[in-house]
Amino acid sequence: MLFERHAPDEDCHPGGGAKVIRLGVIGYGYWGPNMVRNFSEVDGCEVVAVSDFRDDRVALAKSRCPGIRTTSDTDELIRDDEIDAVVIASPVSTHFSLSKQALENGKHVLVEKPMTKTASESEELLHLAEEKERILLVDHTFVYTGAVRKIKEIIDSGQLGELYYYDSMRVNLGLLQQDVDVLWDLAVHDIAILKYLLKAEARAVSATGASHVGGGMENVAYLTLFFDDSFIAHLNVNWLAPVKVRKCLVGGDQKMIVYDDLEPSEKIKVYDKGVTFDGSEQARYETRVGYRSGDMWAPQLDRTEALRREARHFIECIERNEEPMTSGREGLSVVKTLEAASMSMRQRGRLVEL
Amino acid sequence: MLFERHAPDEDCHPGGGAKVIRLGVIGYGYWGPNMVRNFSEVDGCEVVAVSDFRDDRVALAKSRCPGIRTTSDTDELIRDDEIDAVVIASPVSTHFSLSKQALENGKHVLVEKPMTKTASESEELLHLAEEKERILLVDHTFVYTGAVRKIKEIIDSGQLGELYYYDSMRVNLGLLQQDVDVLWDLAVHDIAILKYLLKAEARAVSATGASHVGGGMENVAYLTLFFDDSFIAHLNVNWLAPVKVRKCLVGGDQKMIVYDDLEPSEKIKVYDKGVTFDGSEQARYETRVGYRSGDMWAPQLDRTEALRREARHFIECIERNEEPMTSGREGLSVVKTLEAASMSMRQRGRLVEL
Amino acid sequence: MLFERHAPDEDCHPGGGAKVIRLGVIGYGYWGPNMVRNFSEVDGCEVVAVSDFRDDRVALAKSRCPGIRTTSDTDELIRDDEIDAVVIASPVSTHFSLSKQALENGKHVLVEKPMTKTASESEELLHLAEEKERILLVDHTFVYTGAVRKIKEIIDSGQLGELYYYDSMRVNLGLLQQDVDVLWDLAVHDIAILKYLLKAEARAVSATGASHVGGGMENVAYLTLFFDDSFIAHLNVNWLAPVKVRKCLVGGDQKMIVYDDLEPSEKIKVYDKGVTFDGSEQARYETRVGYRSGDMWAPQLDRTEALRREARHFIECIERNEEPMTSGREGLSVVKTLEAASMSMRQRGRLVEL
Amino acid sequence: MLFERHAPDEDCHPGGGAKVIRLGVIGYGYWGPNMVRNFSEVDGCEVVAVSDFRDDRVALAKSRCPGIRTTSDTDELIRDDEIDAVVIASPVSTHFSLSKQALENGKHVLVEKPMTKTASESEELLHLAEEKERILLVDHTFVYTGAVRKIKEIIDSGQLGELYYYDSMRVNLGLLQQDVDVLWDLAVHDIAILKYLLKAEARAVSATGASHVGGGMENVAYLTLFFDDSFIAHLNVNWLAPVKVRKCLVGGDQKMIVYDDLEPSEKIKVYDKGVTFDGSEQARYETRVGYRSGDMWAPQLDRTEALRREARHFIECIERNEEPMTSGREGLSVVKTLEAASMSMRQRGRLVEL
């Protein structure tokens, strides 16, 4: 068993004297402990408080992190003058009010994805952050992974040629949320990734889906994004799949990428493949096309944990007063796309312009 | 190398005295030789003639099958009184006129998929076959595979419980056709499979897609089929993918299937998995759902070549004057769905009722 | 990213009032923190001290586990009267002296694998534990995994029929040890698993290997174990492989198992496959054999972390004064096999009787 | 189904006027038809006769290849003055006598692997071929694959650095032979590949194995080959495995190769990985080693069928009177290694010098 384990995580350093920015983490459920662990390792900050409205989670935080103040009173945490920034790792429906309160109290905010439940709420937060001159970072975690950053590097280098499509499948069993449907929970990742990878903005969306369990929230959804040119993006998200899949194809006229996030090492494979369309009558009858097939290449990826990089980025943006890569601006744009997709899905695929 | 090879195929038996039904094969391109080879092995029939308008293909057929008459004059083959049935393995655009001519000349017809380029053509053929009392079989090959037949057996046994979704990805590089787009070339398989697996009929369709090469034919397409209840089907087809994928998920509330047609042996995996939706407030906040996870089971499949089984079925339907599993009726229904999907795709996802 | 993470580990509970057995953990390198974490979650015990001779590891332990005493003085820990049991997670060369000292001080001992560097040392510890009436458990972790326990259950049920072979490949890149060679580091796992799975004892061993880096320690090794009957076991271990493989075949005359420890969910696959040997002259010439091929089945496995189960087992054995599943007896037997294998390897495959 | 099929094989062209070398194929069982098919497509030769002592195989050959003479009298074929060369695709036990007879009758010979059942027989054939000035090619098919040729190219370029090991697993279910054991049937491939890849010769061998079915022939075997330096080769062959594996690792100090012959497209993967051994005391205690991990690269392979290339090579060697890549010399060397391995296996791993 010796080699199967990862190095033990370092959970909760109460921090040293050099730390300047003092953080409070709201929500100690699934994602909160990861936030505490990662910010504890980042220079220039210190996690000083954790809140959760559930007593057992507060107790857990207390036992794991003896040096950190724990509370079930989120209000108190948000109003605490000693706290410079808050991390909001609570359910989506609470993102807006907690972020708003925090900004109004002069805190910098890192909020989980999706930013809010409506675009107007996101807009309000965005303006509030500008007005208060606070940093607002939305936790689009994948943008901070070595894999997605490598894909951007490859696209930007022009190797893929003209981009044709982005086709993602993100399915697994379980973890249904009552708070949001599968689009807002899983498709949000790909929408944020697309925003990061592409210069162009999606112009319209067509979505379909179905709800099979629970209170009408879709657990299966399919989303097509249209752009100005023939580039097309498609997302397949599903909470009721028997196997876990995290696979994405990015096609270009020169090369193509297969991105499999579940591969332990070769997550990104670049294929030197393409087609040559021969419009001749003979080709037509024979239904054949020329195609080239060259080498495949799997670049080495930076293995820094995405959340570590994101935490560092948040602290740096605060220190330098710079806009984050995944700022409220990106958060708003993603929420707008999700709103349009939801509207389309309710009308079974009707095109909704963005 | 000894074990890597398949048993040598037996290509072109000129046949023995017991054979009764005399066949002509039209088109000796990609699929035609497989038709010749398979019908040559089926009892009760004899391949007597092969036609192709291309001289080199006629020469190839001649050299491979010295005992079979070869010709570049398809008309002559269709009018030949000695021929009882024709197999039409020519481009889609020729399916209607060749099938019509064959039926008018009293031949039974096996025509490649899709049946025709329009529903009205399919309808005309269907009526003509009934009028002439000839067998009309559409080559929905997958319906004859051990894998798809096993899936139907599992669904019919009720093991999956209530069906939730059918989600298929069928992508690869190359083999673009100018004759039809990717929906008519690849999605046709899944539409035929769905028709075979389900008792219910799709009620509406929403499709999106894009064309990147050649003359405007879509090479990437996404298709959602809606049914009376919450069951949903989704097809992802692509001619420009860097890797070949033939994967399909079938979800039910009791069990779920993963069907991977590229797996050499375990093509069908049945997962005893599902979710239990706990609508409690606690579950809501914790974003957790109960899920059960039991054994997985990969049933042994009948490995008879699908085309062999289909060929035998065609001959038996002729002998017994019975309607084929994939008759003109199924062919027409599939073409209607494709027509609706094309219409939806041209309007970027607009719902088209069936 | 939400679904990619495991639930946060609970690292270092200082424990509650009900805990009776007081533990000290020696060595806070790679495996030690996992020991601390797991014993912290087990009822009936309490981790009270951690030692490591390296100051930085002591500091790390201190920061992570504020409630636990930390020291660089292992002697002091071993002599501490308040401590009932020690966990030895230090290099192999220290196992003997530390275990001996601990037993002499009346402690129960859980020692990492391999138990010691020589069989005579293991024997001495075994006798000492008996004399002192202390529990001695050797950390053959795989024996506590859901996968290996399921394999034993399947073998014991007789489903596989007569056992033919056990064939394991356990290779990866890195983690070379100067302390022991690859046999003592990796093959030890399979030898312990075999001991657990089989009633029979290996009678002889032939091993080969090679050393390519460092000071003469083999980094590649191959080991064959012979038994009284025709059952045969083979282990392939390698520290310089470009990919990580943890795959094992277990063949019987009725069914066969593929055990892939890197599979996220279906680690165990049971194949209903076998051969029928037809000794006829015809079969001889045709080089064909009848073989049957039935369903494949992947049983659901208990996902409890192996080390958690082992920790619980250690505590229970102490409480009930029972011999552990992986006691000093098993530890000694494994070391004897390793000694014989090393002797065989030095003589390039010469058979060494056990 | 359209894209799932391979292009139809072209089985048995009776050939044209330009063909000069006239071939007879002895044995129309498993491999013979592939020989007929491939030589039929090679310029400069013509398959004129096929023999098999079994009437049903003769009948099959007759029906498939109407233009080729078929006979159950192998003697007659061998003595036929019109025949220039014979292909011997019959059981191993017949290789020697048939090859000898053919060479004595002045025929060039292509004989399946392994060349003969003993080294002395191979030696006799080798001398006879030299004496008669005839080409003698042994069918070491893998040497003619795009994959193995690419591995040689990579090794020769020096990219892998100093070679460490070759580790092959070649297992599957079925196709037991009574004629030879699994070493002579499967390990023969790797021994031939090694001979082709390396300049160095193996110096000694240690083999183990077991027989579980039939008349004492081993169906599981493990073979280690030692060389002058620390390079080591290991082969794992098994006829009773539940799954088919054809995987080989080639390790060097600079790069390493994974060769998976069952991968449809990326058969060869080159990993830029290695270790740096840090002999420091700290590293020793921490059991850590530096390792580098760079890109992975899967070169495009020539997809020409190996047997096609081999057939062409045989004809060219005859035309130019050149020694084949896999001549009797290589055949003899492979048989010598197999003989030594068998001797070692009978003595359970005893080292046998070569």
Image: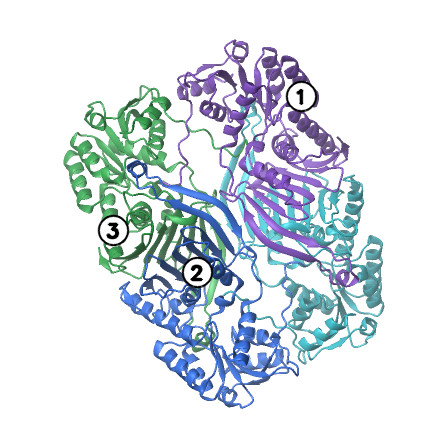
Chain colours: A green, B blue, C purple, D cyan
Residue for point 37% across, 79% down: B123
Q: Residue at x 22, y 22 (%)?
A: A82
Residues tagged by mark 2 and mark 3 found on one chain of the structure: no
Image position of B92 with respect to C99: above or below = below
- In the picture, which quadrant includes the C terminus of chain A? bottom left
Residue A209, located in which quarter of the rendered image?
A: bottom left
Name the residue that disc number 1 marks: C122
- Report, in whole angstroms, how far the alpha carbon at label 2 lies from the one at label 3: 27 Å
Vertical placement of residue C10 versus A177, above or below: above
Q: In this figure, which residue is indicated by the disc labeled 2?
A: B171
Q: Is residue C74 left or right of residue C208?
A: left
Q: Amino acid at mark 3?
A: Thr
Residue at mark 3: chain: A
Amino acid carrying mark 2 in the image: Val
Q: Chain of mark 2?
A: B
Question: In which image quadrant can residue B338 be found?
Answer: bottom left
User: Percent from the top left, x then y, of residue D227?
Assistant: 72, 41
Q: Mark 3 — residue?
A: A337
